[in-house]
Image (cartoon, helix red, strand yellow):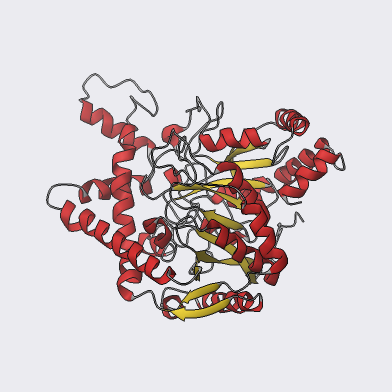
């Protein structure tokens, strides 16, 4: 059941807490050993008791089970970030989004697997093993919010939270048949999110239908004085507008199909076909779709600019993991200097991808290279934002891919940075510009439900939910759950 229906049925007593929680845990027992979606899973008894209490209190999501990416603080549970560096770190407080989840009556079922410190696009760099795509176990689910996507797609949670630095919500949503949203930068508080690249990342919702996605965003969005980047803006009415899109279509809205991705050699033919199908489906719901180019200077340089900025910020943010402030507390050897101790701890407990990005980021910020790489990347970032806002003048949204290929097989790209980073080709645009971006499934390709992406103006989430609702109505792609047999 979708979350909105679970809440209603639990409140009316039409389904029991025992049946709801029990059915989710039965799926976990059957599917989790082969999928590996969770790092920390709470006990059935503890969760069942919390759901009972939540249903009695009421709320927007009263009793609904939510999986949470393991870089978000949930008091009393581990926050590993998919790394051995934080294997034993237990959150001493709730992130703002978790506090708001609890106030809505939602119950956290567990913490989900992820690429280490959110650095990866496939879900394979986790120190706790790769997550597998529930629709085809030999393929990746996408990253870095791999466990959150897999848990919801497999019915092992009703909703999930992920974080998106360069597509980390949207790419796994695209490859697992989910709806996922990277909100406008500042709409959702980052307080309690373990930092990777502060200027790029946002916490966002993942769900199996558009109304659930909107409902979860309503709960977690809004101003937070604990986050200096938080925006003072109205965060209500998302679910209502999503329902309107489902029931009435999107009226006379205008969408631009970004034609660069219909020609780009890095985009698979199947994905080009999905884009054209999505344009046709939106057209059938009253949306006017036209084509326009983004421009080679944006498409070719956005990805390298993103990685320069992300790695530079990561090198700074991850400096705190040194075995003294954070990380395993090992006694220094009698002969070790501070530098030797610091290097030994970080070499031992960080994975290869994290170490690579820290080293590259530090190098890009060093004397003689900062202007050549980091400053130039910031200039490209501004160029990307200006071009996207220019295209959005007079239209409501841009249509482009999220996943540019079908999901690779396990081990196919994780050891080839060039191939892995190229998976983010279309996703980084929204992070560089701070714009909201929605992923919605469009069709099954070789048995795997795959989605496309809609990008709108700053704080244009309502437009995205209206269009997303229309697209869901046109495709019928909702509540897609992997069968257990």
Q: Is residue 449 visible?
A: yes
Residue 291 in percent (x, y) is at 47, 80
Does residue 153 appear in this view? no
At horizontal 43% and vertical 42% (from top left) the residue drawn is 230
Which image quadrant for residue 345?
Answer: top left
Q: Nearer the viewer, residue 431 or 393?
A: 393
Above or below, comparing residue 191 to residue 277 in the picture? above
Q: Where in the figure is residue 327, as x and y percent of width and height?
A: 39, 29
Q: Quadrant of the C terminus?
A: bottom right
At a point 43% along the width and 59% down the height, the residue shown is: 430
Q: How many marks?
A: 0
Residue 153, x across and y down, in percent: 66, 54
Residue 41 appears at what percent x and percent y?
63, 36
341 is higher (above) or lower (below) than 360: above
Nearer-the-camera pick, 80 or 301: 301
Residue at 38 percent across and 36 percent down: it is 349
Which residue is located at x 66 percent, y 46 percent?
32
Q: Is residue 197 above or below residue 166?
A: above
In the picture provided, is 149 more to the left or to the right than 58? left
In the rendered view, does 101 fall on the left or right side of 26? left
Residue 438 occupies quadrant: bottom right
**Nearer to me, 419 or 248:** 248
Q: Quadrant of residue 336?
A: top left
Of all residues, the one furthest to the left in this rendering is: 368
Decide which of 226, 326 is in the foreground and name it.
226
């Amino acid at each position: 059941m979708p979350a909105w229906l679970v809440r209603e049925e639990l409140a009316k007593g039409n389904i029991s807490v025992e049946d709801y929680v029990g059915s989710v845990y039965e799926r976990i027992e059957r599917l989790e050993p082969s999928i590996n979606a969770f790092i920390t899973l709470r006990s059935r008894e503890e969760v069942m008791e919390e759901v009972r209490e939540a249903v009695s209190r009421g709320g927007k999501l009263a009793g609904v089970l939510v999986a949470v990416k393991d870089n978000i603080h949930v008091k009393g549970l581990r926050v590993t970030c998919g790394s051995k560096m934080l294997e034993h770190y237990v959150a001493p407080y709730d992130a703002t989004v978790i506090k708001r989840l609890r106030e809505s009556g939602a119950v956290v079922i567990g913490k989900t697997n992820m690429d280490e410190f959110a650095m990866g696009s496939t879900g394979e760099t986790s120190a706790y093993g790769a997550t597998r795509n529930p629709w085809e176990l030999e393929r990746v689910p996408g990253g870095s919010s791999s466990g959150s996507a897999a848990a919801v797609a497999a019915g092992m949670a009703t909703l999930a939270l992920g974080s998106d630095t360069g597509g980390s919500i949207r790419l796994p949503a695209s490859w697992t048949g989910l709806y996922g949203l990277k909100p406008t930068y500042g709409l959702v508080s980052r307080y309690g999110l373990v930092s990777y690249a502060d200027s790029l990342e946002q916490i966002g919702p993942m769900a199996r239908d558009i109304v659930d996605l909107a409902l979860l965003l309503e709960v977690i969005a809004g101003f937070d004085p604990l986050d200096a980047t938080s925006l003072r803006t109205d965060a209500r009415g998302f679910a209502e507008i999503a329902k309107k899109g489902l029931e009435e279509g999107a009226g006379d809205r205008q969408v631009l199909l970004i034609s660069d991705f219909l020609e780009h050699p890095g985009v698979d033919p199947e994905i080009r076909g999905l884009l054209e199908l999505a344009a046709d489906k939106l057209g059938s719901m009253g949306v006017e779709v036209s084509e326009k180019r983004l421009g080679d200077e944006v498409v070719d340089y956005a990805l390298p600019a993103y990685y320069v900025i992300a790695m530079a910020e990561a090198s700074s943010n991850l400096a705190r993991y040194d075995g003294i402030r954070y990380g395993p507390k090992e006694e220094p050897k009698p002969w070790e200097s501070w530098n030797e101790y610091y290097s030994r701890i970080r070499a031992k407990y960080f994975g290869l991808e994290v170490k690579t990005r820290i080293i590259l980021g530090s190098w890009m910020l060093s004397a003689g290279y900062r202007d050549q790489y980091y400053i130039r990347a910031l200039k490209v970032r501004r160029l990307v934002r200006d071009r996207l806002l220019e295209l959005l003048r007079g239209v409501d949204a841009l249509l482009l891919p999220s996943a540019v290929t079908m999901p690779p097989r396990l081990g196919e790209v994780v050891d080839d940075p060039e191939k892995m980073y190229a998976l983010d080709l279309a996703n980084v645009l929204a992070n560089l510009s701070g714009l909201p971006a929605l992923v919605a499934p469009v069709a099954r390709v070789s048995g795997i439900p795959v989605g496309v992406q809609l990008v709108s103006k700053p704080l244009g989430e309502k437009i995205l939910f209206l269009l997303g609702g229309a697209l869901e109505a046109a495709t019928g792609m909702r509540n897609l759950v992997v069968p257990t047999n």
